[in-house]
Amino acid sequence: MKDRMFYGNGMPYLDVSDLSGRLIVIEGTDAVGRSTHIEGVDSLGKPTLSDNLTKWLEVKGYGVVNTGWTRSPLLGPAIDSVKKGNTLNQITFSVLYAADFADRLENVIIPALKGGFIVLADRYMYTAFARHIVRGINPNWLREVYGFALIPDLVIYLRIGVEDLIRRTFESGRSMSYWESGMDIGLSGDVYESFVRYQTRIIQEFDRMTDEFGFTVVDASRSIEAVNQDLKTEIEKFLAASG
């Protein structure tokens, strides 16, 4: 049993007296394979893994709800729109992402947990911490902003080195996007070099958070099948221990 339910003051106006479900977060940097393992699709939406975590848990008899980064119907489209213009400062972006997260927490995650579902979250506030800190936002301020966040029951960090991440990106046929390369913060005028520098810093931030937030680390540099099996092992172990 967790000592605390929220990282900070939470959402005092919500009834969270009976959250019988489980919140499981899969974290890691861009293109590390979170969607592949959770939903069985790659970043382009193409099927990649038939025995994904969602289907696997459903076969075991669990109700499963998936949620992902910037999927709030209220804020998600707005974030996509302002990113195209790249006209907002970093503080404003941070607040928009926090608002998107809060909307999903209140209207998707907490209701599902009250209904007894397992919520599989493709990224959580830790992604915001890594991305915004790399862009110069004060980490203590960010932790205060996200004080409304529910503490997950299990966070699995898919860790990968930048060399393996580059190889995987090229093998998948994906291009190095403007945002995934950190081109907005001027690390380099070359997309490849900017990608290397940006993703190296993102990975370092996730590594720093591992002890602070108690991440369970899975080596994501291996085959999809090997990583998927480790994810299932860790989730099964957690579910058995939590009853």
Image: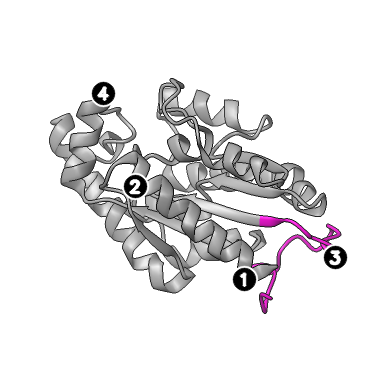
| Tag in front: 1 or 3 | 1
Provide the residue designation for mark 1: 241
The quadrant in which the N terminus is found is bottom right
> Residue at position x 26%, y 23% from top?
175
Q: Alpha-carbon distance for marks 1 and 4?
A: 41 Å
> What amino acid type should be assigned to the residue bearing mark 4?
Ser
Q: Which residues are magenta?
A: 1-22
Quick check: 28 above or below 152?
above
> Residue at position x 27%, y 59% from top?
204
> Residue at position x 57%, y 65% from top?
238
Quick check: 100 above or below 81?
below
**Crowding near pointer 2: few (<14 within 10 Å), some, many (20+)?**
few
Task: Choose the circle earlier in sequence order: 2 or 1.
Answer: 2
| Residue 228: image location, x then y, percent | 42, 45
Provide the residue designation for mark 3: 17
Q: Alpha-carbon distance for marks 1 and 3?
A: 22 Å
Q: Which mark is residue 175?
A: 4
> What amino acid type should be assigned to the residue bearing mark 1?
Ala
Left or right: where does residue 200 sit relative to residue 52?
left
**Crowding near pointer 4: few (<14 within 10 Å), some, many (20+)?**
few
Task: Choose the circle earlier in sequence order: 1 or 4.
Answer: 4
